[in-house]
Image: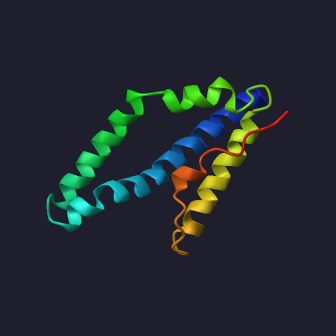
Amino acid sequence: MDSSLILIAIVVAVALAFDFTNGFHDTTNAMATTVATGAIPPRVAVIVAGVLNFVGAFLSLKVAATIASGIVSSELTTPAIVFAGLVGAIVAAPTHSPLLSPTQPGQLRAPPPICG
């Protein structure tokens, strides 16, 4: 198996792990008020959040299209760069939460643009 294919597989696995852990924050932000006010029970909130997060992934690719339109140079972006950005976001998320930092993990997804 080619080493670049192995790296791409690792990047995809890390991206899925990040998406899973990022979902914890998104779900709590979306459902906290409805559960806290008693509008819906926690079990229903988890089901609703899971269904909507799954459906939402298939509704639009506009963010990916915008990034691909030239914000990030596709010639300079490698699987290693994407991997580094994902690892940075995964590591930053738990360090920000205990410090009560306003930064959300979703804001940490993309590394800074690569200028040529």
Residue drawn at the location 64% of the way across and 44% of the way down = 110
Judging from the image, the colouring scheme is: rainbow
Front residue of 104 and 16:
104
- Judge left or right: residue 99 versus residue 85: left
- Judge left or right: residue 81 versus residue 96: right
Indicate the quadrant where residue 32 lies.
Answer: bottom left
Indicate the quadrant where residue 12 lies.
Answer: top right
Q: Is residue 86 above or below residue 1?
A: below
Residue drawn at the location 58% of the way across and 29% of the way down = 66
Residue 4: image x %, image y %? 75, 29
Residue 83: image x %, image y %? 69, 43
Residue drawn at the location 53% of the way across and 33% of the way down = 63
Quadrant that contains the C terminus: top right
Q: Is residue 55 above or below residue 26?
A: above
Quadrant that contains the N terminus: top right
Indicate the quadrant where residue 43 lies.
Answer: bottom left
Numbered-mark total = 0
Residue furthest to the bottom in view is 99
Residue drawn at the location 69% of the way across and 27% of the way down = 70
Residue 22: image x %, image y %? 48, 52
Front residue of 52 and 73:
73
Residue 58: image x %, image y %? 39, 28
- Judge left or right: residue 51 versus residue 44: right
